[in-house]
Amino acid sequence: MNEDTLKQVIEDHSLVRINDHYYLTHKQVKVLEQFKIPYQNFKRAKDLLFYLNYFDDEELDEVALDIASYSYYQEMQK
């Protein structure tokens, strides 16, 4: 893996804080913006996850799965 590829992987997986409520990766934000999903309007990741269930797209399914995994992990840490 060359240095540029490594930098891109790190950037894609770094976290972005959304409205002081939850986190998404840069890659997830890019996908949501591509589909014009108003992810900033949701107060909880679970609300965004519920909204994503209305779409039938493989990329959005992947984002939803990642969010569900993160939400599950966060709940188990309480």
Image: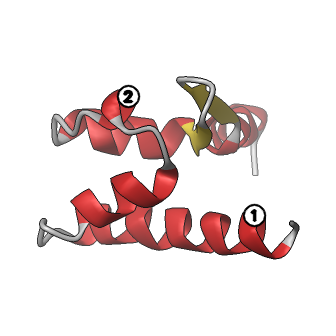
Residue at x-position 66% and y-position 74%: 72
Q: How is the image coloured?
A: secondary structure
State the separation of the CA atoms marked 2 and 1. 19 Å
**62 to 36, vertically: above or below:** below
Image height of 61 relative to 38, above or below: below
Query: What residue is rendered at 13% in x and 67% in y?
Result: 54
Quarter of the figure with residue 56? bottom left
Amino acid type for the residue under numbered disc 1: Gln
Q: Quadrant of the C terminus?
A: bottom right
Is 44 situated above or below 76?
A: above
Where on the picture, by quarter, is residue 36?
A: top left
Residue placed under numbered mark 1 in the picture? 74
Query: Is the residue 73 above or below the residue 8 in the image?
Result: below
Q: Earlier in the sequence, mark 2 or mark 1?
A: 2
- Residue 11 point in image, percent of width and height: 66, 33
**Extreme residue toward the top, this view:** 19
Which residue sits furthest right? 77
Depth order, front residue of 9/32: 32
Check disc 1: other Cα within 10 Å, few if <14, some if 14-19, many if 20+: few
Q: Nearer the viewer, residue 74 or 27?
A: 74
Q: Position of residue 57 (x, y in %)?
A: 17, 68
Looking at the rendered structure, the secondary structure element under dot 2 is helix
Residue receiving disc 2 = 40
Number of numbered labels in the structure image = 2
Amino acid bearing label 2: Gln
Q: Secondary structure at mark 1?
A: helix
| Residue 37 position in % (x across, y down) | 21, 39
Residue at coordinates 32% horizontally, 30% vertically from top-left?
41
Image check: 12 left or right of 58? Answer: right
Residue 2 is left or right of residue 21, and the answer is right
- The x, y position of residue 75, in whole percent, is 73, 70
Residue 56 vs residue 37: left or right?
A: left
